[in-house]
Image (cartoon, rainbow, N blue to C red):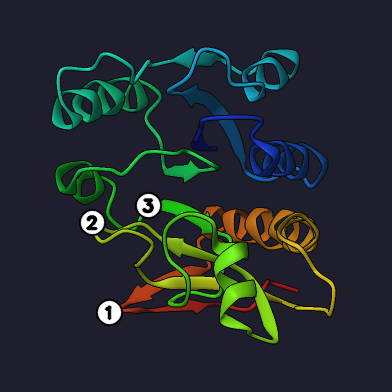
Amino acid sequence: MKNIVILISGRGSNMQAIVKACQQEQWPARIAAVISNKADAAGLAFAEQHQIPAIVVPSKGAASREAYDAELQRQIDAFSPDLVVLAGFMRILTPAFTAHYENRMLNIHPSLLPSFVGLHTHQQALEAGVKVHGATVHFVTAELDHGPIVAQAVVPVLDGDDEDMLAQRVLVQEHLIYPRSVRQFIEGRMTVEGNCVRIAAEDA
């Protein structure tokens, strides 16, 4: 049984999609903990309702990024994680932290990386005039919104779209590709070769 620790900062809609998929599809894994850097994160209540340890490691007032990440790492490692999942965890992580979880920490970013890193990706896409947009699951590295790409989903950018409309269309796809990617990792079907991720076919 593999252990998954999920980090959130807000409602954690992707966390919820992963928890539901894990339970409904009976993965050989358990969500060992949900950890937030904000005490008022709405996703903590969902975790508690599903009998998942919900822990707050407050980032406000931390002495430094390094000190915060060291404490966060200590809390995560108490659950012996096989995989750490970032689900709307709104912090830039230190190189030491990302190195500790190399090739076992996933993130989902609301754009087709390497395009539109950082925040406000949907507005970036609209301003750039692209015809397609989407979401990317990737392994986390020290470089923000980079790292080997696991999966991507594409949505059309439609005439009349605003930021919220585009965001909602992308979010639907996030809730499909992120749980699937986590399951592929847990099942041992994912191999990182340099900057490329290979996914083995599912057993019949």
Residue 15: percent from the left, percent from the top?
64, 38
Name the secondary structure under disc 3.
loop
- Identify the residue at image location x=47%, y=38%: 89
**Residue that label 2 marks:** 142
Please tell me which of labels 3 and 2 falls first in the chain. 3
Residue 180: percent from the left, percent from the top?
67, 60
**Residue that label 3 marks:** 104
Task: Look at label 1 and name its amino acid.
Answer: Gly
Tell me the mark number nearer the camera, choosing from 3 and 2: 2
Q: Could you say which quadrant of the image residue 61 lies in?
A: top left
Tell me the mark number nearer the camera, choosing from 1 and 2: 2
Q: Could you say which quadrant of the image residue 134 lies in?
A: bottom right
Instruction: From the viewer's perspective, tell me whether residue 202 is left or right of residue 121.
Output: right
CB of mark 1 within 8 Å of CB of mark 2?
no
Instruction: From the viewer's perspective, tell me whether residue 127 is left or right of residue 104.
Output: right
Q: What is the distance, in whole Å, between disc 3 and disc 2 at their CAs?
A: 13 Å
**Residue that label 1 marks:** 194
Which residue is the extreme one toward the bottom?
131
Viewer-closest of 1 and 57: 57
Which quadrant: the N terminus?
A: top right
Task: Look at label 2 and name its amino acid.
Answer: Ala
Instruction: From the viewer's perspective, tell me whether residue 161 is left or right of residue 45.
Output: right
